[in-house]
């Protein structure tokens, strides 16, 4: 097996088959149905809610007007080398919004004058990152403190332990740039606790997908010791009221956080599975079963540069210095950079093939040999990125790093013939653990001045957003699914 190929398939999200079909079938119908939606009887409600939430967001943005630093992580600023840096770091620390050390019951650690918000994961890793971004954005809209759990290993096997959010993303920097506290569940409730806490939550999944007939399943409530009584959310939380449309409105979800709307929509909760309690949605700890399919204006909003969740949260979510350092180490090794020499700029290419093969066969009815974009087509996109960087920024980039789940050795030989590089992960799991191949790949994708990705892959989508936001870089997405799909 050639360098760069590993069997864990870092780019896979279990929902991508459905999502890919959803993107193709619904894009035009959503635009047509949007006009009908504006005439619905819920229009006034959504406009009112949107106005209230927008004013709350403006309040946050005006206090954050000077915090748009998007460059590489300054480790010295995070290390607390100066008194001023330490004070700035601690201003939004969890200790100010919790009673103290983790407790056996989560309520014992929540301050009575504070309100919190949480959600649970149930997708692939990149989709889970988007879920947590959506949670933090919703926390801004509702003026609550987000409590974030771990990442669960859906893509690398359930036997792998979860990884803390703060092992992947730089929480001190995120708090500072957003000027708000960000709390992890292991700061609230002790990992050693055997206690179960009862809590009422919103069931949004059944409102989005009524044929499911239940909340979205997640392993996390059991892992956190939560016995949840779910209340089915109203159907008007959907972004567009089509039966097969899963996306929900940020504004509508925010409305459910406030007393007036909770009173208007008072329905009987379902029993919790352990204690058989019927509890309304909790006021102090607002929780939703699932927040991946949420947008402000369009489905799959992260595809667009206007995405508010990305602009106001996601672009501030940087890798930890440890992950960034590993990515730099792997890039230097891949490119053969000697000690003491500066790491050169590069263009990252992410081609997702593995599980997308099912979409080729089942949806496109296209043979694999004709479904994925051939390497010369990808090279054309790489050349476009090189040309844009040269014309717009005066930067000549020669190094191209391919990151893919493709397992065909001949394909990798063709990559090598183009003069491109591949990352060797043969020892990564042994050295750093099973989470790190995908983390290092994602950091390399976001670390270059240019990026070429795969249309329909959420991993490519976030890499594109990071390169554009953090580096002011050049990006392209390669279309696929039939011969000539990327012709332009």
Image (cartoon, helix red, strand yellow):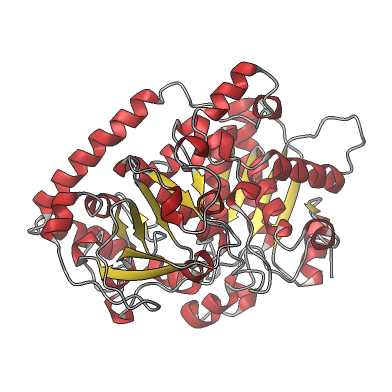
* 78 relative to 1, above or below: above
Residue 21, percent from left and from top: 42, 72
Question: Can residue 6 be seen?
Answer: yes
Residue 210, percent from left and from top: 27, 77
Residue 462 or 137: which is nearer the viewer? 137
Residue 361, percent from left and from top: 54, 81
Taking the spot 46% from the left edge, 42% from the top edge, the residue there is: 98
- Number of labels in the image equals 0
Question: Can residue 307 be seen?
Answer: no
The quadrant holding residue 325 is: top right
Taking the spot 9% from the left edge, 59% from the top edge, the residue there is: 40
Residue 328 or 146: which is nearer the viewer? 146
* 416 relative to 18, above or below: above
Residue 439, percent from left and from top: 68, 53
Left or right: residue 51 versus residue 150 is: left
The quadrant holding residue 264 is: bottom left
Taking the spot 60% from the left edge, 73% from the top edge, the residue there is: 355
Q: In which quarter of the image is the N terminus?
A: bottom right
Left or right: residue 42 versus residue 202 is: left
Left or right: residue 5 versus residue 341 is: left
The quadrant holding residue 84 is: top right
Residue 317 or 352: which is nearer the viewer? 317
Left or right: residue 487 versus residue 382 is: left
């Amino acid at each position: 097996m050639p360098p760069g190929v590993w069997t864990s398939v870092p780019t896979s999200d279990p929902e991508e088959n459905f999502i890919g079909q959803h993107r193709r079938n619904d894009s035009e119908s959503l635009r047509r149905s949007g006009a009908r939606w504006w005439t619905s009887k819920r229009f006034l409600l959504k406009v009112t809610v949107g106005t209230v939430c927008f004013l709350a967001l403006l309040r946050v943005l005006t206090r954050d007007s000077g915090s748009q630093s998007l460059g590489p992580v300054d480790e010295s600023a995070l290390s607390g080398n100066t008194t001023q840096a330490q004070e700035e770091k601690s201003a939004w620390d969890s200790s100010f919004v919790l009673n103290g050390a983790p407790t056996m019951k989560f309520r014992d650690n929540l301050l009575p004058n504070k309100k919190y918000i949480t959600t649970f994961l149930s997708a692939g890793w990149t989709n889970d990152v988007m879920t947590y971004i959506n949670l933090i954005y919703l926390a801004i809209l509702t003026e609550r403190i987000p409590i974030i759990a771990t990442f669960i290993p859906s893509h690398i096997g359930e036997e792998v332990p979860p990884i803390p959010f703060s092992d992947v993303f730089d929480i001190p920097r995120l708090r500072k740039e957003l000027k708000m506290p960000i709390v992890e569940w292991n700061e609230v409730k002790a990992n050693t606790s055997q206690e179960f806490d009862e809590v009422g939550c919103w069931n949004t999944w059944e409102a989005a997908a009524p044929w499911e007939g239940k909340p979205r399943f997640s392993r996390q409530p059991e892992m956190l010791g939560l016995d949840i009584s779910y209340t089915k959310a109203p159907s008007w939380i959907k972004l567009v009221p089509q039966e097969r449309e899963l996306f929900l409105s940020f504004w509508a979800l925010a409305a459910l956080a406030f007393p007036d709307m909770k009173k208007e929509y008072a329905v009987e909760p379902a029993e919790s599975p352990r204690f058989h309690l019927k509890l309304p949605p909790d006021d102090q700890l607002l929780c939703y079963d699932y927040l991946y399919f949420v947008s402000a204006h369009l489905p799959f909003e992260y595809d667009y540069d206007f995405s508010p969740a990305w602009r106001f949260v996601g672009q501030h979510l940087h890798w930890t210095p440890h992950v960034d350092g590993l990515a730099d180490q792997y890039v230097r090794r891949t490119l053969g950079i000697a000690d003491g020499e500066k790491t050169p700029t590069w263009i990252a290419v992410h081609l997702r093939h593995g599980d997308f093969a099912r979409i080729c066969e089942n949806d496109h009815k296209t043979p694999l040999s004709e479904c994925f974009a051939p390497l010369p087509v990808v090279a054309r996109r790489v050349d476009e990125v090189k040309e844009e960087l040269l014309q717009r920024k005066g930067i000549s980039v020669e190094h191209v790093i391919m990151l893919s789940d493709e397992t065909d050795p001949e394909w990798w030989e063709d990559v090598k013939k183009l003069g491109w590089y591949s990352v060797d992960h043969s020892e990564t799991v042994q050295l750093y653990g099973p989470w790190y191949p995908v983390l290092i790949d994602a950091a390399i994708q976001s670390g270059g001045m240019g990026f070429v990705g795969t249309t329909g892959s959420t991993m490519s989508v976030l890499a594109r957003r990071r390169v554009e936001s953090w580096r002011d870089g050049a990006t392209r997405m390669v279309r696929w699914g039939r011969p000539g799909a990327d012709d332009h």
